[in-house]
Image (cartoon, rainbow, N blue to C red):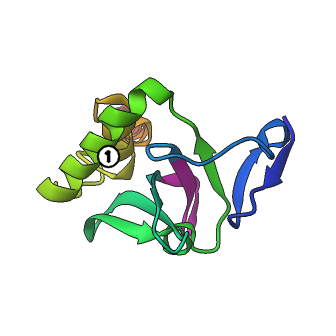
Amino acid sequence: MSTCVHPLQNIIMPLALQDTFVLRAGDEMRRQVDGFSIFSHFGCFAGFDYLGRPWVFHHTKEGTELVLFERFALKYQVYFKAIKDHERPAAIIRMRELLINRKQYSELGFNCEHAKNYVTKGKAYSIQSSVCIMLAVAGAFAFIGSTKMA
């Protein structure tokens, strides 16, 4: 599928949507993790302020916060996925809930992907964390198997 750069900066979207897509509160956002090209950092679009600046909800080691799009994007392209309109009210409520409750960050227990999925889907889970755990378990079994052969 072809993509283009959205006028907001470096948001990538399908060409077919370039003139019709409007970012709306709750839309999923993803960018590369600084220094780790295989991992992604996730957030949700929170909306525009009165000056027209875009804000993003995300969860980091510093906590759950709203940041300007530029701070979320850093130097990377940002990819998005629109959520369904009927899911937006619940996503906005869950976003506010996490901002108020300030859940502790944990790489495996509750990271940015957990927060994004909780906001957009109502269930906190992380595919990246699950893959890391499976790789660690497989590595441990491989190590144990190689030491028994020696």
Residue 78 seen in the figure: yes
Residue 140 seen in the figure: no
Relative placement, left or right, of 98 versus 92 is: left
Relative placement, left or right, of 63 versus 81 is: left
Magenta stretch holds residue 36 = yes
- Snapshot quadrant of residue 105: bottom left
Image coordinates of residue 131 in percent, x first then y, are: 43, 36
Q: Nearer the viewer, residue 23 or 122?
A: 23
Considering the whole magenta stretch, tell me its main secondary structure. strand
Image coordinates of residue 36 in percent, x first then y, are: 55, 62
Relative placement, left or right, of 23 versus 88 is: right
**How many neighbours does mark 1 have within 10 angstroms: few (below 14), some (14-19), or many (20 or more)?**
many
Question: Which residue occupies 38% across, 58% down?
Answer: 58
Q: Nearer the viewer, residue 33 or 76?
A: 76
Magenta stretch holds residue 105 = no
Can you say whether 144 is above or below 45 in the image? above
The image quadrant where one finds the C terminus is top left
- Snapshot quadrant of residue 52: bottom right
Question: Which residue occupies 75% across, 63% down?
Answer: 7
- Secondary element at image label 1: helix
Can you say whether 85 is above or below 61 in the image? above
The span picked out in magenta is 29-42
Question: Which residue occupies 44% across, 42% down?
Answer: 128
Q: Which residue is mark 1?
A: 115
Question: Which residue occupies 41% across, 70% down?
Answer: 67
The image quadrant where one finds the N terminus is top right
Image coordinates of residue 146 in percent, x first then y, are: 41, 37
Relative placement, left or right, of 126 versus 110 is: right
Q: Nearer the viewer, residue 60 or 3?
A: 3
Numbered circles on residues, count = 1
Mark 1: which amino acid? Ala
